[in-house]
Image: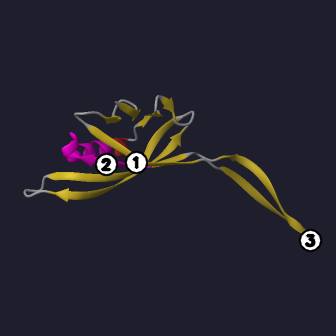
Amino acid sequence: MVVGNWGTDIVFRVSEREALLLQNLTRTVGSEWATHSRIGLKDQSEYLRPSLQQVTFTLVLDATLGVRPRATLDKLADLTERGEVNPLVIGGRRVGRNRWKINSTSEAWNTILNGGELLRASVNVTMQEYL
């Protein structure tokens, strides 16, 4: 069953054959404000604009769940360095109104087998809204 996707390149899914697990998704929405000093009075705030939204999440890559951890890590690194931009969809609904870019990934190689084969890894992904 498909949980969501980032374009056609990354599909979050859980099935009997394969599981690309998406965990700990956090979305940050904010705005920019200016503060004006006033003599003898409290500072005055002025709304400027909305900030770019940000999403962070962890992907669990486990070969015992039908995922090729090393290949997936390489694919994510390539997509990040190429500057790919795609809609982020979770549960059939877009996250935010705009497309998303990957700002950074951080890998943890959790289990490495004899011969250097990667059995289990996790990767923290940071995305930012793209306009």
Residue under numbered circle 1: 23
Residue under numbered circle 3: 40
Q: Are marks 2 and 1 in contact (CB under 8 Å)?
A: yes
Q: Residue 100's spot in the image, x, y percent? A: 48, 39
Mark 2–mark 1 distance (CA, rounded to whole Å): 8 Å
**Amino acid type, label 3:** Gly
Dividing the image into 4 quarters, which one contains the N terminus?
A: top left
Compared with residue 128, is residue 34 higher up or lower down, i.e. above or below? below
Residue under numbered circle 2: 60
Query: First in sequence: mark 2 or mark 1?
Result: 1
Q: Indicate which label's residue lies in the foreground, 3 or 1.
A: 1
Q: Indicate which label's residue lies in the foreground, 3 or 2.
A: 2
The answer to whether any part of residue 106 appears in the image is yes
Magenta-highlighted residues: 57-78
Mark 3–mark 2 distance (CA, rounded to whole Å): 55 Å
Q: Residue 11's spot in the image, x, y percent? A: 34, 34
